[in-house]
Image (cartoon, rainbow, N blue to C red):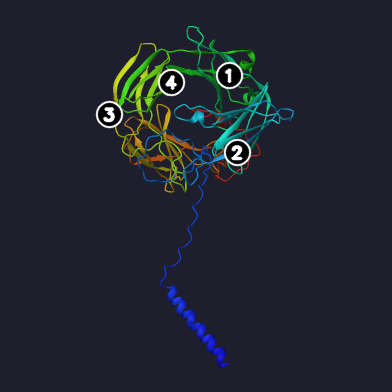
Amino acid sequence: MIAVLAIVLVAAIALIVWLGMGSEAPPPSAPEKPKPAPVRVPVPTPHRPRPVAFEPVPVEMKPPVEHEGNETTPSGERETFDLDVEVFGGNGAAAAGATVVLLDPFAQHAGPARPAEFGRKKADENGRAKFEVVGRVLRVYAWLGNEAGASDKVRVSETRNKIAVRMSTAVLPHGRVVESGGLPFEGADVRLVAAQWYDDPFGLIVATTSAADGTFELPAVPLAALDGADPETVTIEATAKGWPRARVVVTTDTLRAGEVLVTLERGAFVRGRLVWTGGQPLAGRQVRLADGRSSVDSGDDGRFELPLPRSGGDALVLGLPLVRFRVGTDVPSRGHLFSDVNNAAKYLGRFRGDRGDIDLGDVTLSAGQPVKGVLVDVDDKPVKAGDVTLSLAGVQVAAVQTDDAGRFEIPEIGDDPHVLSAMEPPGENAWTGRRHTSVDGVRGGASDLRVVLTGALSVLVKFLAEADRSPVVVPEVTLRATATGATPKGYG
């Protein structure tokens, strides 16, 4: 027994000595935490999520990063995925030889015009086409003969990399692009633009280029999409450098009737040079007509030359879009941010296109100032997550959402009078829309705006006895309302 105790005692002493020697060594480092994967933000919808707060920092001027939703690897490189597309005809069989294109569903909502198509292939004998794409939101469009179809908007990812497109009976839009004198116009960019695609407000664009004789042939378009479209929401547009955009509204009947004639006309030019308050030229700023028929960018020397249609229009200079950082990452998702330069929009004026060219000389853009305020309802309660926008000459130049206290702040707004519009978030009161209001004449520097949501989306009628004002049950009643002012058609 004594021997056993001696052995245990020696072992204990040896353990203590070993631990003492080990304590002089540095403690083992904690395992490095894995870097969180980039969080994928949902595709923007009419009710936008509240922007993430961030500190402005100057960034190097580069081409605009693509719309929200692009994925990046930890090294900053864009992650790519294999996309497998299957195309089926109206009879359910594989559509071998169908043309398959990848479309940017946000192209028509971008400030500067940008191509909608970024990938094209032919389906193989099994009706399949494979693409390598970055993680982004896209729409797949396919056509073959007199059939065509499109997918919904899809965010391509590792788990969402197969898309099926089912085609149906379609019509083939075709026609000619000519100048105002009737001469054929070669090389014009021709697009069919559907402002809404079924129930999707982001719509759809398919494009082509006019031939030497001015003729064009666009991809086939499903009849079902055209038959269900609201009037004047589907157009064929043509534009070329130095020419305003021309639009022709089309329907199923006009497309079936034959070729669509699109006439390009130009009345005059508005010329000028954009400069900072210190006189330095302002390059890369968009100058456009409010109705979108004409748009150019200022050159390195700040000069621009904006073509006008004969009917003229309102011209303005738009600010650069701000960087928005995706939650959990430091990767900008769109646009540029310059913390030390003016970013305000400016109204240039209304010009006629039938009275010769206009030279504005130097156009100086002054520094923008923030617009601050609070959004409340008729009971003076703050409205959180309300949408607040600012427009200049009918063009939206800024958009934010209110915080939990109903407050909002829009940075870098110019001296011109803007229209502020506010709308409540979707909720139980939304019958066919949302309560909204507008304020005219808002300029940069306004810091104490109090915007009140007035009006109602429904009218509550109570029947009371004239004698004692007690409730009366009316078995049947007919109510008629007459619309006054600018009443949306959707209210019926």
Q: Residues within 10 Å of mark 2 (few under 14, many from 20)?
A: some
Q: Residue furthest left?
A: 278
Front residue of 200 and 272: 272
For disc 1, the marked residue is: 250
For disc 2, the marked residue is: 82
Q: Position of residue 49 (x, y in %)?
A: 49, 43
Q: In 3D space, how far apart are the residues under numbered discs 3 and 4 (Cα atoms)?
A: 25 Å
Residues tagged 3 and 4 counted as in contact (Cβ below 8 A): no
Q: Nearer the viewer, mark 2 or mark 1?
A: 2
Q: Quadrant of residue 292?
A: top left
Q: Residue at x 46, y 12 (%)?
A: 265
Q: In 3D space, how far apart are the residues under numbered discs 2 and 1 (Cα atoms)?
A: 36 Å
Q: Earlier in the sequence, mark 4 or mark 1?
A: 1
Q: Residues within 10 Å of mark 3 (few under 14, many from 20)?
A: few
Report the disc number at residue 325: none
Report the disc number at residue 294: 4
For disc 3, the marked residue is: 280
Question: On the picture, is 437 further left or further right than 277?
Answer: right
Q: Quadrant of residue 410?
A: top left
The type of residue carrying mark 1 is Val
The type of residue carrying mark 3 is Gln
The type of residue carrying mark 4 is Ser
Q: Which element is circle 3 on?
A: loop
Q: Residues within 10 Å of mark 4 (few under 14, many from 20)?
A: many
Q: Is residue 37 above or below residue 226?
A: below
